[in-house]
Amino acid sequence: MNTWRNASLAVTAAAVLALTTACGQDQGTQTPNGQAVGAANPAAPGGGGYDSDAGYGSDAGGEAAAAKPAGQLAVWESKDLGKVVTDSEGFTLYRFDKDTAKPPKSNCEGDCAKAWPVVAAGGATAAPGVDPSLIGEVTRADGSKQLTIGGWPMYRYAKDTKAGDVNGQGVGGTWYASAPDGKKAAPGGGAEEGGAEEGGAEEGGEAADLAGLSVRKDPKLGEVVVDKNGMTVYRFMKDSAWPMKTACTGDCLEKWPVVEPVDKNDTVGILKKGFVTFDRPDGIEQQTIDCWPIYTFSGDAKPGDTNGQGVGGTWYAVSPEGKPVGAPK
């Protein structure tokens, strides 16, 4: 019994030592956010998608996903689809041809709502440059409130597993990515016809098939980290790496969505030291570089944007070593 206990303690000590070495070995044995040090897990793949096994008409079973708010809406421009609206985490929002906009009405219930999770109405903010009056809500049959854009009820797609996916485009000839005005996304904007598209999209000819985190050479900032969609990654100067803490919570996360965990092998040119998952007190898992929590900015509409640089004197793009690019010394 003592032998087993001693072995267990040795394993625990090794885990503490590994994280301490990664995240500030000369800072003592403080714990990130009051958790046991070992609670900051090695980064794992995945990314907060929606049940990829659910499908309309399938017998996958289970309940429809709880409606999740969209938060700060954003718009990115696809070479093939034109302007597409996403939620604050970069997931594509869709509309259903069997719904109606005048008056707003959803006709997606039961199995349909398992494959096409409803977007909750609360807390949605119009994308920058988009008329806020287009944002509304509709009461569903169960009494819940669903987000509408231009009168059209909004949904996500269960088989979109990462930001930037448009796997729902053209499904059944009735489901289409939404444009910022609630119409079907299409090149040129505002058209009601949208071609089917499977997989990720491209913007401005830039491949969407990037590593989970990689490096882009910005003409003004130099080398900065970008996510799998080419969106600039940022650091918040009010955060802390050791102990690992975040000062961005609540409404802040609507403007600065966290970067979800990325597998170390799914990175190019990024510092691997301190590349761990931060188990935030709010239950969200967040990627870190050199133990610093990292984010994207809802005000960046397309790959290459750096609209978050220097905001409030506290937000800065991240270098491949996890440093804040251009921050005052």
Image (spheres, rainbow, N blue to C red):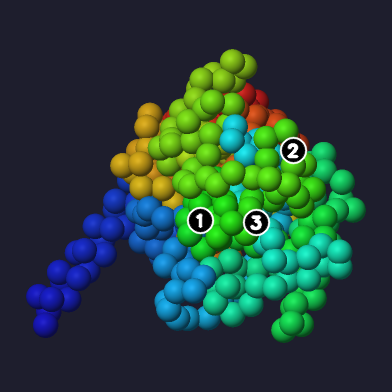
* Among the two numbered marks 3 and 2 on one chain, the one whose residue lies closer to the N terminus: 3
CB atoms of marks 2 and 1 within 8 Å:
no
| Depicted 86 relative to depicted 146: above or below | above
Distance between mark 3 and mark 2 Cα atoms:
15 Å
| Depicted 325 relative to depicted 25: above or below | above
Q: Nearer the viewer, residue 215 or 41?
A: 215
Image quadrant where residue 108 sits: bottom right
Residue at left offset 35%, top offset 41%: 266
Helix, strand or loop at label 3? It is: strand
Q: Which residue is situated farthest in the top direction here?
A: 219
* Among the two numbered marks 2 and 1 on one chain, the one whose residue lies closer to the N terminus: 1
Q: Amino acid at mark 1?
A: Asp
Q: Amino acid at mark 2?
A: Gly
Tell me residue 184's x, y (percent). Answer: 70, 49
Residue ID for mark 1: 160
Tell me residue 311's x, y (percent). Answer: 73, 35
Q: Nearer the viewer, residue 158 or 122?
A: 158
| Depicted 35 relative to depicted 253: above or below | below
Residue ID for mark 3: 94
Q: Which residue is situated farthest in the right direction here?
A: 133
* Among the two numbered marks 1 and 3 on one chain, the one whose residue lies closer to the N terminus: 3
Tell me residue 6's x, y (percent). Answer: 16, 71
Distance between mark 1 and mark 3 Cα atoms:
11 Å
Q: Nearer the viewer, residue 48 or 62?
A: 62
Near mark 3 (Cα within 10 A), the count class, few <14, some 14-19 or many ≥20, is many
Check the picture and name the quadrant holding the N terminus: bottom left
Distance between mark 2 and mark 1 Cα atoms:
23 Å
Q: Amino acid at mark 3?
A: Tyr
**In the image, 111: left or right of 40?**
right
Counting labels gives 3
Near mark 1 (Cα within 10 A), the count class, few <14, some 14-19 or many ≥20, is many
